Image (tube, rainbow, N blue to C red):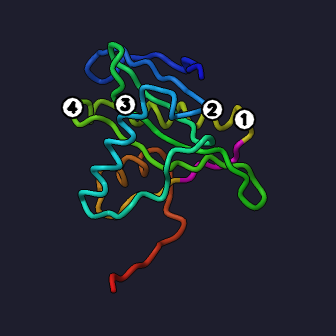
Amino acid sequence: MTEKVLFTAKDKRGAEVVIKHSAQIAYTPAISLFMKHHAELIEKGWGLPMFLATNRSQVVYAEINGQVVGEIAFEVKDDTYIKIIQIYAGAVEPAFRGRGIYKMLHTQLEAYGKSVGCKRIRSEVHSDNKPMVETLDSLGKRITFYRIEKDL
């Protein structure tokens, strides 16, 4: 599976960031960050992730000097009346956080979604993940429903 370069820009520290897209996450260097991120979520007690990489899993990922530093795993889906991008997971390596990398990834994912006819982009984030909630808010996302849970 080939990756396509979507965008190249400088991050907040002046490093060149290359944003790539692949139609299958399993065959990209981003898979290791994706798996590491899910292991961290499980360790935090956030439960088993709702998403496992499948043949429909796509990814946009960021590289700096050939190293994968961030990723967003997603799927293009038909949702009732419209085509959407459903984000299943996203992560930036801790050493690269605060540099605008997730925003670059998300912005390029939005552009990709528009190019394939999507009308909405959707994601779920754990309520304890305040930095991500703030990031998504800054990207113009809004809360559209709450999932209420109780451990038994």
N-terminal of the two: label 3 or label 2? Answer: 3
N-terminal of the two: label 4 or label 1? Answer: 4
- x and y percentages locating residue 91 in the rendered image: 36, 41
Tell me, for residue 101, which label it has, or none. 3
Q: Nearer the viewer, residue 112 or 33?
A: 33
Task: Measure the C-alpha gap from mark 4 to mark 3.
Answer: 11 Å
Relative to 99, is 34 on the left or the right?
A: right
Tell me, for residue 116, which label it has, or none. 1
Q: Residues within 10 Å of mark 1 (few under 14, many from 20)?
A: few
Element at badge 4?
helix
Is residue 49 part of the magenta span, yes or no? no
- Residue type indicated by callout 1: Val
- Residue type indicated by callout 4: Ala
Mark 3 and mark 1 in contact? Answer it, CB < 8 Å: no
Task: Measure the C-alpha gap from mark 4 to mark 2.
Answer: 27 Å
Q: Residue furthest bottom?
A: 152
Residue at 49 percent of width and 37 percent of height: 106
Tell me, for residue 112, which label it has, or none. 2
Q: Nearer the viewer, residue 126 or 13?
A: 126
Relative to 13, is 148 on the left or the right?
A: right
Tell me, for residue 95, which label it has, or none. 4
Which region is colored magenta?
Answer: 118-122
- x and y percentages locating residue 40 in the rendered image: 27, 50
- Residue type indicated by callout 3: Ile
